[in-house]
Every structure is written in C-alpha cells, then in structure tokens.
Amino acid sequence: MDSTMNTDEMMAVHKAWYSIPEVAFQIARSAYGREFALLPPKWIDHSEASTRCLRCHNTAHFNFLMCDLLHAYQKAIPYQCYCSLASYAIDGEPGIPRMSANLQARDTQGWRHEHWKHMVGYDWLIDIDSPSHSAKHMDLARQTALSVVDELTLQEMPMQVRYSGCGYHIIVPASALRPDSYDPDNEESTYKFLLSETKKLADDFGELIDLGVNDDRRVTKAPYSLSIYRNGIFAVWPLKNRKELERFEPGMAAAARLIDDPGLRAEIRDRGTPTWPAIEIGMPVLEAQHG
C-alpha cells in the first residue's frame, strides 16, 4: 500500500478515534432514520468489504457493526462511515428495514429497487472537492465554500457546514426543501431539481463544486467520522458559523492531533452538529423557483 502511514499506524488512529464515546454517539445520531454504510477508502484494495444497507440508531449498533459484524480491527480495514442523504420510515418507524446480520445470506436487491418509496426526506448536498491538500487548493475550496454559504444565507436557507477531509460539505436539510418526487425515474424528481440548483452554484462559484452527488442512493461521510487519505487522517468536522469557516485550516481536523486534546470529548458534546444560520423559516426561496 503506497502510503505515508503504515497499516498499524492507520489502524491505531482509527481504533482510538472510534473508541471515543462522543464520536460513536454523534455518528449514530446522524445515522438515525437513514441508511448507514461502512466503506473502505477508494485507494485501499478492499472493495469487497464495502457494506451498505445497515441500521445504526445508537452507539451499541455502531460498535456492533464496526467490531463484531465487519471485524474492522481483526481484518485491519479502516472503514469510513457514511449516511444516506435520504431519510426513511417503514410503517411509521424511522429507518431502513432490519436485515440479517449474515452478510452472505441477506438479500438487499429488493430494498435497493424499492427504497425510494419509503423516503420521508432527502437533503441537498453541495460537495466542494479540493484536488489536493496543498495550501493553494485548500484555500480555493474554503473560498468557494464561503461564497456558497453567503448565497444560501441570502436565500435564508438553513445549512450544516463540515470539513470533509479534502474540501467542504454544505448540507441543506430536507425540511427546508420542497418534497418533490423521490422516484429516480420521474423527470421532475427531487434529484434533478437539486442538480439544476447545484449547477447554478457551480456556474457562479467555480468548478470545485461536484455535480455528481444528487442521486437517490447517495451517501455522504458522517459528521465526526474519519476521512482517510494516504497522507493523513482527518475528522469530518462540523463548523459552527461563518467565522469558523473563514479561519479553518485542515490541520485543525487532523485526527491524531484531536485525539491528544484532553478537551476533545467536551468539545464534541458542546459542538454537536450545528445548523446555521439559526433562524426560523418556512418554505425557502427554492420552492418559488421550482414552482
């Protein structure tokens, strides 16, 4: 494996991070009612270990999935944690169906085809990807994020903003969006509408905005999960406000540095996953634009 970190170093950071109770709690909180997935980094040759269609509604679920179901530490696979942009309910109960813990025996094909019929929401992800961790590229990604944040703020759109490990994720919650069709084959689906809105942002604010992230099965890295690269491991770190975004540097989210911080657990408890700006709104501008 071509990496500046060897496997033992990488797994030591991985295990230390996910052993922090507040980390597991925040990930399970974000995964509640959604599809959860544990996926190895793309640059590691363990694609067969990718596992989707998981339920993770509490810290016990999280620890079972990571340690007992997928045996991450026995197999030395540094899984990354993802949540679906879609939220679900089955007969009024939040989440996806319960499936067999026998990964070889369970059949997810039916769910993959019918899942959209059980959606109760779908968040808008604006994914700003930096080409590298160089200071030049990361500064451009931050400036792009600031421009998008300012545009959404003008529209009075609530959002969550996170450092993703190599860029920024800006997520507008489903509660602020008009609930159009979740059928992926519908020409007026939510996904096509959000793609058109994302294209407008990309036209205005640059090519770092990914146009390929609004589809019915999309998952995104969970807040406080690890984003693992050859040259380092970063926490997917929620930001409280624009001032934090202005001042943010990738090193602030380096997992090894955070693990050594004696105030980390209190910081995670206090920070949570903030939504900003913290204003009460009804249907935002996006409804009028689409209607």
Image: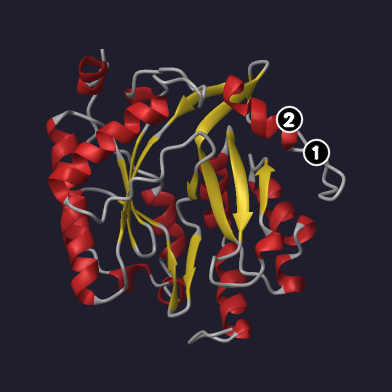
Quadrant in the rendering for residue 141: bottom left
Identity, as a three-letter code, of the amino acid under mark 1: Asp
Residue at 41% in and 17% down: 180
Residue with the mark numbered 2? 110
The residue sitting at 52% across, 22% down in the picture is: 183
- How far apart in space, not on screen, are marks 2 and 1 (Cα)? 7 Å
x and y, in percent, of residue 136 in the image: 19, 73
Question: Can you give x and y, in whole percent of width and height, for residue 84 in the image?
Answer: 53, 40
Give the SS element for disc 2.
Answer: helix
Q: In screen coordinates, is 206 left or right of 93?
A: left
Where, quadrant-wise, is the N terminus in this rendering?
A: bottom right
Q: Is residue 216 above or below residue 73?
A: above
Instruction: Note whether 231 is above or below 277 in the view shown.
Output: below
43 with respect to 270 (left or right): right
Q: Nearer the viewer, residue 3 or 19?
A: 3
Name which residue lies at 26% across and 18% down: 290
x and y percentages locating residue 289 in the rendered image:
21, 19
Q: Are marks 2 and 1 in contact (CB under 8 Å)?
A: yes
Q: In screen coordinates, is 254 left or right of 157?
A: right
Classify 10 Å Cα crowding around label 1: few (below 14), some (14-19), many (20 and above): few
SS of the residue at dot 1? loop
Quadrant holding the C terminus: top left
Q: Which amino acid type corresponds to the residue marked 2 in the rendered image?
A: Gly
Return the x and y of residue 128 as percentages of the image width and height: 30, 54
Residue 96 visible within the image: no
Coloration of the structure image? secondary structure
Q: Check the image and name the residue furthest to the top.
A: 291
Where residue 168 is drawn, which disc sits there?
none
> Dot 2 surroundings within 10 Å: few (below 14), some, or many (20 or more)?
few
Which residue, given by chain and number where applicable, does mark 1 sit on?
Answer: 107
Quarter assignment of residue 18: bottom right
Decide which of 165, 247 is in the foreground and name it: 165
